[in-house]
Amino acid sequence: MKQHVRILLGLAFMATVAACNKSDDVRPSGPKVHIAKPEQTIAVGQELELKPEFTQDAGISFRWTLNGEPVGDKATYTFKPRAHGDYKITFAASTPNGKDSAVYNITVLGQYANGVLVLNEGWFGTQSGSVWFYKYGADTLVPWVYHAVNPGKNLGGVMNTLQYGAIHNGKLYMVVKAGGPLVVTDASTLVETGRVENAVSGKAMSFVGLDATRGLIGADDGIYPINLTSLAIGSKIAGVSGAIGNMVKSGNYVFAHSNNDGMIVLNATTYAVAGKPFKATVGFVTGKNGRIYGAKDSLLMSVHPTTFVKDSVKMPFASVNPFGAWRSVQMASSTVNDHIFIIQPAANWQYGTKLYRYVVGNAASLAAPFITLPAGQYFYGSGVNYDHHTDELVITTINGPYTGSENRVLFYNAQTGALKKTIRYDGWYFPAMTVIQP
């Protein structure tokens, strides 16, 4: 009996010890932090209020850091970026019992990165060129955005025309024709970073970037290399003469539209002439299939990007040489489908109203226009661009076959040809082209 009692007392003692030990193991834990959207994107000029979730506990304190630097000690934080870039914002919650943290990774776009840039020629003899901005989802254009961030600067004088723009390696290169400058800005903020006054003795017309330090300028007498670091322009490239319009780079070749020779192909490293595949009337754009497309009279032509082997399909109209009053090519290509878009020119110097779509490999797709503009509107400038962000065709028009003071930017579904939105802005601006962010 005594033995039995001793055993029971021993078991009771062990149970008590175990219970005490278990109680000691359960200690109060620190706060737990949760972020619903750790990856976010905003633009310069916007604010972002960050409200992380966390468990409450006595004596809790908070700490915010922005790229490692302390910026706050409240439960929420309002981020107001002044420059574009990538930001790491850390939120930490602490109590005497422990702490937890989480990280926001915020991408800040430049003020003009989330939309389409509209380059206007200007009113020759009266007003210089300008850049306007369409923000995705808006119903209007923001006017004079280059001038807004570059007070006191200009895009040439009233006798020059802003004719061409291209984004390369984070920079926007704008070419002001007829004696104007080459102006370089940050592509997303439009803050000017450099310029060349009276570029190529006033003959500059177009631009293409090659790599981080080299580019080419198309001029009315040939092609010139430019150092993108110093903006020093070199001597004219041998073997190329006459006016040069659009240029596209593919691999180690540059395909340039020449008034004298049609398509000229340059080695992008040595600048040696590698070929002259066909006498192009207009050009060029790069198709989704990698081929380089242009037109020769009533043929829509293409060449393989390395072998230069040609292909063609008949169009129901003839293309017209753009030189003289040169403007960027009235063509575009989809990045979603093997579709090439080309504007039908009107008679004489009038502006056209019809756009055709070639579905590569299907000649019948050119039998009828893909888009006919609304009554009273006419393509102007390059006229059409493809926006790979929205799968839309961005079209610029004016209200007269020769001239017009009503400018419009139209947005069409690139798959169906349905008109989605029209934005009108009045004045003698003459839209030269639109520029799509990479």
Image (cartoon, rainbow, N blue to C red):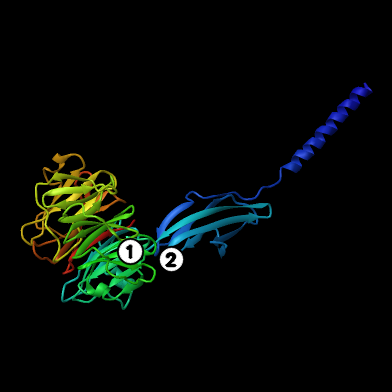
Q: Amino acid at mark 2?
A: Ala
Mark whose residue sits in front, 2 or 1: 1
Locate residue 310 relative to residue 56 in the image: left or right. Answer: left
Label 1: element kind: strand
Q: Position of residue 75 (x, y in %)?
A: 55, 58
Say if residue 395 shows up in the picture.
Answer: no
Q: For the point 20% across and 39% down, which residue is it?
A: 361
Locate residue 70 relative to residue 257 in the image: left or right. Answer: right
Tell me the CA gap for discs 2 and 1: 27 Å
Q: For the point 44% across and 59% down, which residue is it?
A: 48
- In this view, the residue in front, 37 or 309, is 309
Q: Residue at label 1? A: 215
Q: Amino acid at mark 1?
A: Gly
Give the quarter of the figure containing the C terminus: bottom left
- In this view, the residue in front, 220 or 117, is 220
Q: Residue at label 2? A: 83
Q: Position of residue 333 (x, y in %)?
A: 24, 50
